Structure formats: C-alpha cells, structure tokens
Image (cartoon, rainbow, N blue to C red):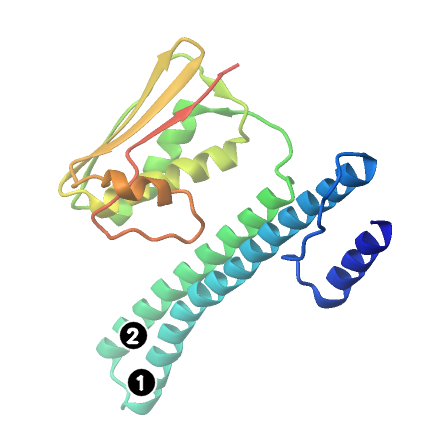
Amino acid sequence: PIDRLTRTASDVARTGRFSTRFTVQTQDELGRLGATFNAMLESLETTYERERSFIGDVSHELRQPLTAITGETELALQRPPDPAHDHETFERIKERATSLRSLIDDLLLLARADARAFGTGTGEVSDSLAEACNAVRPFYPKITLAVHVREETLMVGIPAPLLVRLFTNIVRNAMQVARARVTATVTHEGRNAVVTIDDDGPGIPEAARGLLFRRFERLPRDQHLSLIHISEPT
C-alpha cells in the first residue's frame, strides 16, 4: 500500500493530473492516510479547475475593451480629421479605458480576497451607502435614486473602502436595470444592519439566483440583485 501511495504521489507530481486517486481498501492507518491523500487531491483538482476557468474568464473580459479601443483607434487613424467625430471617438475610447481600469481593480480585489489580505477594520453602514450612491448617481441622470439612512451609527466588521465598493456595485446594477426609480434603505433589526437596494426593474428569476455570486457571471440586463444583509454591527 505504501508503494502504491508513493507511485500515485509521484504520478501526480509528474503529470499534474489531480484526478488521480489512491485506492483505499482498509480502515487502518494506511487506509486513513489514503483517504486523506484523496481528499487533498480532490481539493487540488477543484482549485486547479477553478483557476483555469478564472484565467479564461479574465482573458475574455480583458479582450473585450481592448478590442473596442483598438478598433476605435484604427478607424480614427483611417479617416480624415474631423473635430466633432474625433471627440465622439475619444469619448468612446475613454469609456472603454475606464471599464478596463475598473476590471483591473476588480481583479486586484479578487486577488486580495483569495490571499485573505484585506486586513482588519470596520465601516459605518449609512455613510458607506450614502457615499456609494453619490458616486453612482451622476452616471444615471434619468433614474431617481432615493437614499434613506439611519441617524445612529451602525458599524460592521468590514473595512470602509470595501463596504463602499460593495454598495457601489449593487447600486450600479440596480440603476442599470431600473425603469425610473431606485431606493437604498438602511434599517436596524436586532444585531443586524439590513441594507435594501430596491428598484422598479423586472427582478431576478429564481432559477438564476444561484449564479449571482459566481465570478464573471453575467445575467441578462433585466436581472439584478435586490437585497443584501450585513450582520452583527459593533
């Protein structure tokens, strides 16, 4: 059994095939060692597949704005100078570049999350929500954004910049799909601060809700997240 375990470990190291498993036939110490070895391989296989999918998703997401920027630039270089037309081109390039920068920031945020490098800190819920709404509101002038916060301080164990980022993402999603109105509300229920982002869009089908927190998952434009909870304010 030890020889088989050694050969299996050597095979995994040589080929990188984490799908390999050690055959466990006993319930003694060697059997438990083999089961532990298999559990480790299963964990490595899951991590490997997730990272491979992540790299593919990142490549796709980065390629889109870069392709758009390259296309706009090539067209601008081919046509005669036209101040009005060139201004529109530069605006589109700026929009794509801003999207690319936001994506890179998201990737850095994910890397820090995976490395558990966020550190410690707290954030105030009402202030963070108000800051996020103020940042998003100018980009959607046709949508009414109402903010209702609490007068009392509601602190949670999330660093303030991350809390603002969280609210900004969700409020932006709501503004994108809203027909005319979005309401952001903070309430206090026991030890919980409850933040509700509500819009008059069509909502998220129940079948799609399990996909909401998958990285780079994009739902159709008429589907969105409407409710989050942040627990245990200090």
Which of the two discs, 1 and 2, labels the residue nearer the N terminus?
Answer: 1
Specify whether 146 is left or right of 180. Answer: right
Alpha carbon distance from label 1 to label 2: 9 Å
For this orientation, the residue located farthest to the front is: 25
Depth check, front residue: 102 or 46: 46
Depth check, front residue: 98 or 227: 227
Residue beneath label 2, please? 89
The residue drawn where x is 80% and y is 61% is 10
Q: Are marks 1 and 2 in contact (CB under 8 Å)?
A: yes
Residue 196: x and y in percent read 30, 27
**Which-is-in-front pick, marks 1 and 2?**
1
For this orientation, the residue located farthest to the right is: 3
Residue 13 marker = none
Specify whether 1 is left or right of 25. Answer: right
Residue 221: x and y in percent read 23, 52
Residue beneath label 1, please? 75
Find residue 225 and report its image quarter: top left
